[in-house]
Image (tube, rainbow, N blue to C red):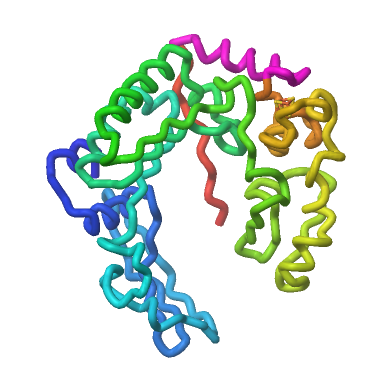
């Protein structure tokens, strides 16, 4: 289903959630938990492609809070903050190949009646880094999209909170990745690995604990991986003596490693980094309007 189709047909929020799920914007898998057995959802056909969900059986016990088993999220709750359903946020990832459609995306958000629209430019890690040449926008493309978003933000003030997140490659200082390594967040992967961020396992020399073997508290306080880039002692110059070190924590460790080969380097997205030329060169290449738009996709191993 195309964005144009959605725009032509006014739809309510609940239906919108279902459609976004079908679009892949927010994957939903309907599950029923009965008698301690999880049943997979039936086969679905999306855009002519048949997705077969293989039935699986998982033994309990499940600790399901029965009070959460409601079909109407606004009913039977003691939370006075829940008035008319959950606030709906629409997050759309931007890149060179869809930036020109920011106005359409904002119209879609208005049609859906979202409370918050996050237009987030791609951050170039993992597969996005492999496809950077085809995804990183030029300054002109980025400025045009940002102007459209700014105008809409003013027009929609009080109705939709609209955020336009710049890519690191066009900011002079990095973002505070994960609000600091091992400072606020712990991510548990499906196989139980406790990670300081979703790509931390790609960094060499770190050993991650599994929540099936150690308690969360032990991991948080004593894991060597969480301690590796916690605080400021690990920081090189210019971070070590920079007044922003308690604001951005030296940037992203994964970006530092995947661009420079050194996870302890200052994030090259920072204009003060000795490796900032890596970002400058990528940005310069993105100004070429004749960049081939072919993308490299993941291959499903069987
Ligand atoms: S030098 Fe380090 S601490 Fe300072 S702004 Fe750059 S990344 Fe942040």
x and y, in percent, of residue 95 in the image:
44, 28
Please give left or right for residue 34 compared with residue 201 in the image: left
Q: Quadrant of residue 171?
A: top right
Identify whether 78 is placed above or below 143: below
Residue pictured at 74% horizontal, 72% vertical: 215
Residue segment shown in magenta: 271-289
x and y, in percent, of residue 156 in the image:
26, 34
Which residue is most to the left?
9
Residue pictured at 70% horizontal, 50% vertical: 183
In this rendering, does residue 201 appear at all?
A: no
Q: Quadrant of residue 265?
A: top right
The quarter in which the C terminus is drawn is bottom right
| Residue 272 painted magenta | yes
Residue pictured at 55% horizontal, 33% vertical: 123
Identify whether 189 is placed above or below 35: above
x and y, in percent, of residue 299 in the image:
54, 45
Please give left or right for residue 187 compared with residue 230 in the image: left
The foreground one among 17 and 271 is 271
| Residue 267 painted magenta | no
């Amino acid at each position: 289903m195309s964005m144009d189709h959605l725009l032509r047909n006014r739809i309510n929020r609940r239906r919108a959630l279902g459609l976004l799920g079908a679009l892949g914007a927010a994957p939903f898998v309907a599950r029923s938990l009965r008698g301690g057995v999880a049943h997979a959802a039936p086969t679905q056909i999306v855009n002519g492609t048949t997705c077969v969900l293989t039935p699986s059986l998982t033994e309990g016990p499940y600790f399901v809070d029965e009070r959460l088993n409601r079909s109407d999220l606004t009913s039977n709750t003691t939370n006075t903050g829940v008035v008319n359903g959950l606030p709906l946020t629409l997050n759309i990832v931007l890149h060179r190949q869809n930036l020109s459609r920011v106005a359409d995306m904002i119209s879609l958000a208005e049609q859906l009646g979202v409370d918050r629209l996050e237009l987030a430019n791609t951050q170039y890690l993992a597969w996005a880094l492999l496809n950077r040449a085809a995804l990183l926008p030029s300054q002109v493309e980025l400025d045009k999209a940002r102007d459209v978003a700014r105008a809409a933000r003013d027009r929609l003030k009080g109705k939709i909170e609209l955020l336009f997140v710049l890519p690191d490659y066009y900011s002079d200082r990095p973002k505070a990745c994960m609000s600091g390594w091992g400072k606020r967040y712990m991510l548990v992967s499906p196989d139980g690995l406790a990670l300081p961020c979703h790509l931390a396992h790609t960094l060499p020399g770190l050993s991650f604990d599994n929540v099936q073997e150690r308690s969360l508290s032990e991991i948080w306080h004593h894991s060597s991986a969480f301690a590796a880039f916690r605080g400021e002692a690990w920081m090189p110059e210019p971070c070590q003596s920079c007044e922003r070190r308690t604001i951005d924590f030296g940037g992203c460790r994964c970006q530092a490693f995947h661009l420079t080969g050194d996870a302890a380097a200052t994030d090259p997205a920072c204009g003060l980094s000795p490796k900032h030329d890596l970002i400058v060169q990528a940005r310069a290449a993105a100004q070429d309007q004749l960049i081939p738009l072919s993308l490299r996709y993941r291959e499903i191993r069987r």
